[in-house]
DNA sequence: TATATCTGTAACCCTACAGGTTACATTTGT
DNA sequence: ACAAATGTAACCTGTAGGGTTACAGATATA
């Protein structure tokens, strides 16, 4: 039961810190590499936009990584947000363990 | 480099086959358990709706699973769709391995 | 058989977000 | 000082989640 204590790193930060900065690449250049608009990349870089499956595929091509790497970052980030932006989901009553155990 | 050959199972099918059916639970009942509308659950069950982070949290409560389990199913499904619904992303030119190796 | 329940689905509403173009003000680098 | 880079806003289109209501068909049950 490993709880996520801190807010997970946004994928945009990884792109910014671990790729663009070391490579001294501008947002314009990289947007062009990815075949997307400067605005879209800027939103991601500044952590106001999400990594979509299509974007994950593009990043995986550019950086020779897996699309899953990027989607997992986004998934962890989104999940943390959902956990902390509402308590509604905590109202869900777990089905009785006995019921589940006896059928599954 | 394990390619995804077949279309990944939709999370809705898991809910349907591995939970609702064994538990003999109706969609109405379970929608009520989750605190969502029948329509929303019906869309997911019939594989025309996605597992959102909030929904993953609700499912994890009800079935005593992890939210990641459900989000991973959805992620794999979405990624497969993105891979096969367009070839645009394949146009992205990988950054030269030398460039990456020398800076990262 | 008659009644009630369950189910898929459509119509309609609202909100939100991806992604694009254009434009502007500011910052940064040369 | 000048040019490039950047953040951001406005505006557009398309898509998606989620809700309610309503209807038709299937299923089950009294």
Image: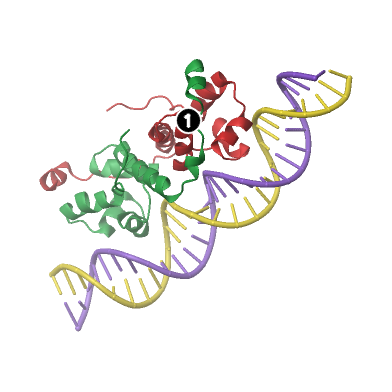
Chain colours: A green, B red, C yellow, D purple
Q: Quadrant of the N terminus of chain B?
A: top left
Count of labels in the image: 1
Chain under callout 1 = B
**Residue at which label 1 appears:** B11
Q: Residue at x 40, y 36 (%)?
A: B79
Can residue A103 be seen here? The reply is yes
Q: Residue at x 21, y 56 (%)?
A: A25
Placement of B86 over or under A26, stated as above or below = above
Looking at the image, residue A99 sits to the left or right of residue C30; the answer is: right
Q: A22 and A82: which one is in front?
A: A82
Q: Give the structural element (helix, strand or loop) at label 1.
A: helix
Furthest-left residue in this view: B102
Placement of D23 over or under B27, stated as above or below = below
Q: A38 and B65: which one is in front?
A: B65
Rendering quarter of residue C15: bottom right
Residue A78, image x, y percentages: 39, 45
Q: A30 and B15: which one is in front?
A: B15
Q: Residue at x 29, y 47 (%)?
A: A6
Category of crowding for the residue at label 1, using alpha-carbon neighbours closer than 10 angstroms: few (below 14), some (14–19), many (at least 20): many
Furthest-top residue in this view: A102
Rendering quarter of residue B83: top left
Residue B56, image x, y percentages: 45, 37
């Amino acid at each position: 039961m490993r709880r996520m204590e801190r807010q997970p790193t946004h994928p945009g930060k990884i792109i910014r810190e671990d790729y663009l900065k070391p490579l001294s690449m501008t947002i314009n250049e990289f947007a062009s590499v990815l075949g997307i608009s400067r605005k879209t990349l800027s939103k991601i870089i500044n952590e106001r936009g999400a990594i979509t499956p299509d974007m994950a595929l593009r990043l995986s091509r550019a950086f020779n990584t897996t699309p899953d790497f990027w989607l997992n970052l986004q998934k962890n980030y989104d999940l943390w947000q959902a956990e902390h932006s509402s308590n509604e989901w905590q109202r869900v009553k777990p089905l009785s363990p006995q019921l589940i155990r006896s059928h599954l």
